[in-house]
Image: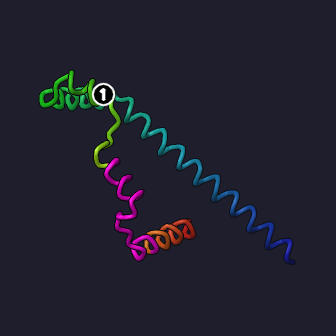
Amino acid sequence: MVDQIKSKINTNFKQNSLESSKEAAKQVAASVNKVKSPENNQNAKNVNQNVSKFISKDSIKQMSKEPPIDKANVSRIKMAIANGTYPVDLEKISDALLDAYKEMKDR
């Protein structure tokens, strides 16, 4: 009797997972078609042209060469940590760790 129940559960699970994977494949295909459409490519070109109005090509090249990090701020924080003067809020750290744990547990 138990084997029959397991058998039914397994077939129902297989059918449901097959249907959900087919639906997911359809959604992915629709998303790919949207990205490939010429209208979206034209919109992306328009956005790039609008951004280029505000930022020169030289500044874009310069930004791409440098990491998006404020080096002065990083060195200031490193010095404060080394000196032992960087403020550490243990309550905030413990709350963040607990939230991260809860998030991992829910997955």
| 49 relative to 87 in the view: left or right | left
Whether 26 is among the magenta residues is no
Quadrant housing the C terminus: bottom right
Residues rendered magenta in the picture: 74-94
Residue at the far top in the pictured view: 58
* Residue 46 image offset from top left, x and y in percent: 20, 28
Q: Where does residue 57 sit, x and y in percent of width and height?
A: 20, 22
Q: Which quadrant would residue 82 be assigned to in this image?
A: bottom left
Secondary structure category for the residue under label 1 = helix
- Farthest residue toward the front? 83
- Nearer-the-camera pick, 72 or 54: 72
Image: 68 above or below 105: above
Identify the image quadrant of residue 106: bottom right
Q: Residue at x 47, y 45 (%)?
A: 27
Instruction: State the predominant SS element of the stretch in magenta.
Output: helix
Dot 1 amino acid type: Asn
Camera-side residue of 54 and 79: 79
Give left or right: position of 46 versus 37.
Answer: left
Q: Give the image's coloring scheme.
A: rainbow
Residue found at x 58% / y 54%:
20
Asked if residue 81 lies in the magenta stretch, the reply is yes
Q: Position of residue 1 (x, y in %)?
A: 87, 78
What residue is drawn where x is 57% and y is 70%? 105
**In screen coordinates, is 11 left or right of 73?**
right
Q: Which residue is mark 1?
A: 41
Question: Looking at the picture, does residue 98 appear above or below residue 24?
Answer: below
Instruction: Count numbered badges in the picture.
Output: 1
Image quarter of residue 89: bottom left
